Image (cartoon, helix red, strand yellow):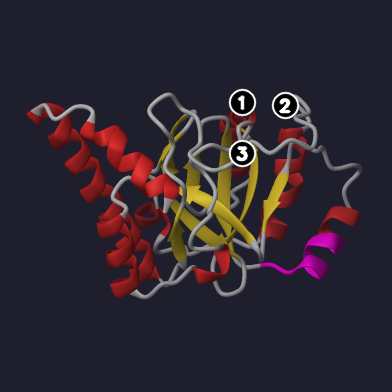
Amino acid sequence: MCEILGERRANDDDNTPGRQAGWADRGWALRDAAQACAVRGWPVLPGVAAAPDGSCRCAREDCPVPGAHPVDPELLAATADPRMVRWWWTSRPAAPILLATGGRAPCAVSLPATAGPAALAALRGRGVRVGPVVAMPTRWALLVRPYGLPELGELLHLQAGVPSSLRFHGRGGYLPLPPSPLGRGPVSWVRPPAEAADAGLPGVAKLIEVLVEAARSAPDQGSRLAY
């Protein structure tokens, strides 16, 4: 509850009509987007809202992903129940939307944003079908059909080295979804679900070779989390 109370106090600092209207519009947009995820059957949960200065309201002073991780409720509480989703974002209108990846939900592969456009161009050039694509402040994520560790391990074993700048969001992971406001900037759609609705989600096997090659051109971000 600490982050919720802190958010409300911050909001109360400025009661001008224009500022309040802006918060209301953002809250409606987040709630509508979260409910749209539930309609698709995507399990979501609210993240910790970032403070106005971009820092995180969680207990970590050096949080590497401010505004982009769950605290309360925990990740296992993610749901596609429209009633629960509506209640969450009515109670926490500024909360980022987090997709709990894996299981029956989409998985994702992410790479640095600097390599994202080239990766999409290469995939289209090969005639590879691409699903929804999320743009985060420093990374792009491509949503794919659910995959398991054995399948992913076999695919990566066939590659001549996998750069650490390429990340995999499978079972037990999560991914911020638009229009979430994160500590370092907003999340948006490069390719929204509506554009990929007819084709559905691609399998990770179709994308992996191109994404590995694209990620090799991006800086190594080491083991530190980023988004």
Q: Would you identify the image quadrant in which residue 150 lies?
A: bottom right
Q: How many residues crowd mark 3 within 10 Å: few (<14), some (14–19), many (20+)?
A: few
At 45% from the left and 67% from the top, the residue drawn is 42
For this rendering, which residue is in front, 226 or 53?
53
Image position, residue 153 (x, y; %): 84, 61
Measure the C-alpha gap from mark 3 to mark 1.
Answer: 28 Å
Q: Report which residue position mark 1 lands on.
A: 114
Image position, residue 221 (x, y; %): 75, 30
Given the image, on which type of amino acid does mark 3 rest? Arg
Q: Would you identify the image quadrant in which residue 161 lies?
A: top right
At 53% from the left and 43% from the top, the residue drawn is 58
Q: Report which residue position mark 2 lands on.
A: 218
Q: Secondary structure at mark 1?
A: helix
Q: Earlier in the sequence, mark 3 or mark 1?
A: 3
Given the image, on which type of amino acid does mark 1 rest? Thr
Q: Nearer the viewer, mark 3 or mark 1?
A: 3
Q: Secondary structure at mark 3?
A: loop
Task: Look at the image and give the residue range highlighted in magenta.
Answer: 147-154
Answer yes or no: is residue 179 visible.
no
At 46% from the left and 47% from the top, the residue drawn is 48
For this rendering, which residue is in front, 180 or 17?
17
At 49% from the left and 48% from the top, the residue drawn is 176
Q: Secondary structure at mark 2?
A: loop
Q: Report which residue position mark 3 lands on.
A: 60
Based on the picture, tell me whether residue 206 belongs to the magenta stretch: no
Q: Is residue 225 above or below residue 184?
A: below
Check if mark 2's residue and mark 1's residue have beta carbons within 8 Å: yes
